[in-house]
Amino acid sequence: MTAAPGPASSAPPVPNQVAECSYEFLLSEILQWVQRDEKRVAEQARQVQQAASGQDGSPERNLSPNNEEAAAVMAAERSAARIERMGYDVGYRLCERLAQHRPLMGPGSPSPEGGTASADASGNSNIDVNAPIIMGGGGHNTVMDPKTQLEAVKFLCKEFWTEVFRKQIDKLQTNHRGVFVLKDQELKWLRRLPPDEESARVGAIRILAFPCGLIRGALANLGLSGAVVSCDFLADGKTMASCSFNIKVK
Amino acid sequence: MATSKCSQAGQQLWAKMPKVGGYTRLCFAWSVIGFLVHTNSSYRITHQANAELFALTYGSLVTELVRDHEDPIEVNKQLDKIGKSIGVRCVDEFLAKADVAGLGLASQCQSLRDTAEVVARMGFRMFLGVGAECGAFSQDQKSFSIYFHDNPLSTFVELPPAGDDQMGDDLRKLKYSNIYCGIIRGALEQVNLKVDVTLVQCTLKGDEVNEIRVELKEVLADGAGDDYKEE
C-alpha cells in the first residue's frame, strides 16, 4: 500500500477532524494488540530456536528461568521497536503534510539542490520569509548548521506537537551541538495512568515509544535523518504524565 | 489501562436505565444523543483530533498486520477483533455523553429500523464527523445497510492494482476498513444485539459508496441470568 493523495472528486471533502476519543481508542487498541502479539512472536521465536537445537541432535530442554526472562525482555523490546516503527511512519508522513501548509524556515535552510546553506542564504536577501519552503530530498545529504537544526526542532515542538497533542512542548533545551531535550509536563496519553504503580511505569514506557517514533519520523522528514531519540518517564507521584524526549542529532 | 471516567459514568448510567430489552435501552440512549445532535452545538462537545493523523495511524496498523500475516483474510479477522474492543468503549463513551447532557427519558425507539437510524446518523457523526445513512432494509426487517461517502480512514490510501503477480491479487481481498465492522459488532453486542457485520462496498476498490451490511442474528437475554436473582 502506498501513501498517495486521493484523486480529486466531486464528492464533498473528507472532514479534517475526527472526535478525539476515536483516536485515543484506536491508539490504545493498537498498543494492546502489540502487547497481545508479543506472545505470538515470542512463541514463533521459541519454535525457531527449538527447531534449530533439535537439528543439532542434542535435545536441549528449555533451560533455566534465565532463558524465559531473556525471551520476555526480548519480546518487550521487539514490541517497543514495532511501536516505534509505526510512529516513525506516521510522523514522517504527518510532518510532510504539515510542512506543506506552513512556512517552515527562513533563509539558511538547505535548498533541494544541496550545497552550502549559508552561501545560498546570503545571496537571497529578498526572499519572502513567509513563503513556504519545502524540505525536499536534498536535505538528507547536507549537514545542517545548528541554527537550522534548532529551527527544525522548534517546528516540531510547536506546530507538529500542536497537531498531535493540541499543545506545544513545554520546555526545549539544547546545547547547540546537536543534543536537544524536550520536556512535556502533561502528555495527553499518559494522563489516565494510576499513580505509583510499577505496571503503570511499564505501560508508560510502551506508550512513549509511539511519540519517540513520531519525533524521529518528523525529524527525518525535516532533514535531520539519523537522529537518535530516547525518552524518559518523569512521573513523580503527583503527575503521571510528564516525560522528556532526548534527541541526539549526528 | 485504568478505567476511564467516561467508562465509569457509562456504567452508572447503565445501572440507572430502565430494565428493558436490548433495543429500547440502546435506542433510549442514542435517541437522547439524537436530540443533542439536533440542537446544533452538541457535536462540538467532543474535542477534536487531526483526521490525517487518525488515517495515518490506522494505515501503519494495517501495514504491520499485512507484514505479519501472509493471508489477507487473517488480516481482516484481526482488524475485526481490534474493532470489537473499540466498539465496546465507543458505547460507553456514547452513554456517558448522554449522562453529561443530563437529558431525561426521551422517546424510545421500537424496532431495528430506529436503531439503524441512530447508528448511522448519530454514531458516525459523533465519532468520525461523517454523514451516513441507513437503507436497504430486508423483508423481515432484520438487516440493513449503512452507506457513507467519506471514509476518514482511507485518506492517502491506494490499494495496489490487481496485477498478474500473486501479491497484488491477494491484497485485493483485504478489507481495508474492516475495523468498522468490528466496532459496530462490539457496540451492538454491549446492548444485547448480536449482529453479523460485513463490509460490502468500499471506495478504495472503486465502488461509488462505502456500504456496511448489518444483520441481526439474535437479541441476547438481558442481565446475568436466573442464577443471580436479587436478594
Image (cartoon, coloured by chain):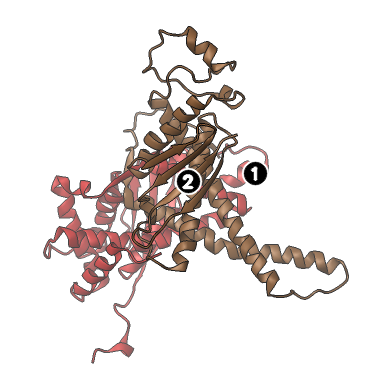
Q: Residue at x 31, y 88 (%)?
A: B228
Residue A3 vertical position relative to residue B193 in the rendered view, above or below = above
Residue A3 visible in the shown view: no
Q: Is residue A169 left or right of residue A59?
A: left
Name the secondary structure under disc 2.
strand
Disc 2 chain ID: A
Residue nearer the viewer, B3 or A13:
B3
Type of amino acid at the residue the image marks with label 2: Phe
Disc 1 chain ID: B
Q: Position of residue A134 (x, y in %)?
A: 47, 22
Q: Residue at x 44, y 42 (%)?
A: A182
Residue nearer the viewer, A68 or B212:
A68
10 Å crowding of disc 1: few (<14), some (14-19), many (20+): few
Splitting the image into 4 quarters, where does residue B148 fall?
top left
Residue nearer the viewer, A171 or B219:
A171
User: Which residue, as the protein is rendered here, is positioned at the far right?
Assistant: A57
Residue nearer the viewer, A137 or B71:
A137
Count of numbered marks: 2
Q: Which residue is mark 1?
A: B167
Colour of chain B, in one word, is red
Q: Is residue B11 left or right of residue B106?
A: right
Residue B155 vertical position relative to residue A109 in the rendered view, above or below = below
Q: Residue at x 77, y 76 (%)?
A: A61
Q: Position of residue A3 (x, y in %)?
A: 51, 35
Q: Which residue is mark 2?
A: A245
Chain in brown colour: A
